[in-house]
Image (cartoon, coloured by chain):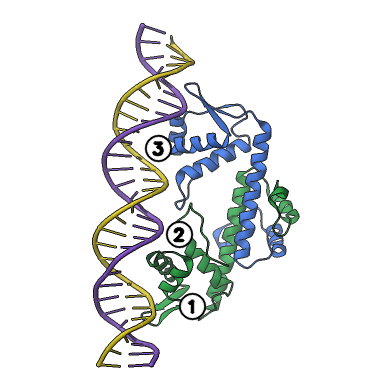
Chain colours: A green, B blue, C yellow, D purple
Amino acid sequence: MAWSFKEDRPIYTQLLEQIQARIVTGQYKIGERLPSVRELAAEAGVNPNTMQRALAELERIGLVYSQRTSGRMITDDAQKIGEMKMQLAQDVIEEFLQNMKKLGYEQKEIAQLIEQYPTGKRKETEKA
Amino acid sequence: MAWSFKEDRPIYTQLLEQIQARIVTGQYKIGERLPSVRELAAEAGVNPNTMQRALAELERIGLVYSQRTSGRMITDDAQKIGEMKMQLAQDVIEEFLQNMKKLGYEQKEIAQLIEQYPTGKRKETEKA
DNA sequence: CCATTTGTATTATCTCCTTAATACAATTAT
DNA sequence: ATAATTGTATTAAGGAGATAATACAAATGG
């Protein structure tokens, strides 16, 4: 998955989330070394300072740790990564349900909508 | 539903969304008059300028229109409101599915998770 | 030994969001 | 008529996020 950002939220937050996703899905493997701050920044097309901020936050959370000059490593705590994935999924679900309820949908309707929801991408003309 | 905001997105955007939700759910009724900018701003605890910005955006979308000194009215175009609700729901669903897929879940799993998802609020200790 | 790479820190600048404090014209209410 | 309310506009100030340009110490790699 390539880097991409929405405009209405801080980039460093979105970087944090996307790196988090790469870790819990195993795209960045457990115990592995991350690309350097400058590399990652170049990849994502952002300023190194911005990337550094996201990484510092990941460090605070405990998903990665830095070794001064040899780079940054992903934690080797498999359980932590597993729990993180569960937590992130739950957060996404909670937010989704809240959003739908704000629009007036109830849990039963929501479940149906998801079941029926077509898989894959469709043309614009088919959307409405 | 009371006004509430997250910190990582512009307030005027969230105001826009929340008013939109009130309109499509009928909390603000079709053709009805909205509270004044100053009232709404006081209610929401934001600066009148910020509320004005959100309302101007709603106007651009065509959900409300202003009559100089008699206030702001909600559109009486029932179809427009209906379509808006559909569109908003679809956007929420799309974003949800995208978020889940970024975490490594596939459509089938997601459907199951939603079905099984417990209704109502639970205690913190029950969450994990 | 020495150049390179690492994370990290600093300073400056720019833009966007938010609040604040007014102001004004048009209308409504009294 | 007159006061109050409406949407709207303007100017100023501040704070946060992002970029840019450097800088430095601590390794690492040759």
Q: CA distance from mark 2 to mark 1?
A: 23 Å
Q: CA distance from mark 2 to mark 3?
A: 26 Å
Tell me, yes or no, if residue B60 can be seen here: yes
Give the position of the N terminus of chain A as an image quadrant. Answer: bottom right
Tell me, yes or no, if residue B120 can be seen here: no
Label 3: chain?
B
The amino acid sitting under disc 3 is: Asn
Alpha-carbon neighbours of circle 2 within 10 Å: few (<14), some, or many (≥20)? some
The amino acid sitting under disc 2 is: Ile
Q: Foreground residue, D22 or D25?
A: D22
Q: Foreground residue, A40 or B114?
A: A40
Helix, strand or loop at label 1? It is loop
Q: Residue at x 58, y 58 (%)?
A: A92
Marker disc for residue A11 = 2
Q: Foreground residue, B108 or A49?
A: A49
Marker disc for residue B47 = 3
Helix, strand or loop at label 2? It is helix
- How many numbered discs, if any? 3
Label 2: chain?
A
Q: Is residue A63 left or right of residue C22?
A: right
Q: CA distance from mark 1 to mark 3?
A: 44 Å
Q: Is residue D12 left or right of residue A36?
A: left
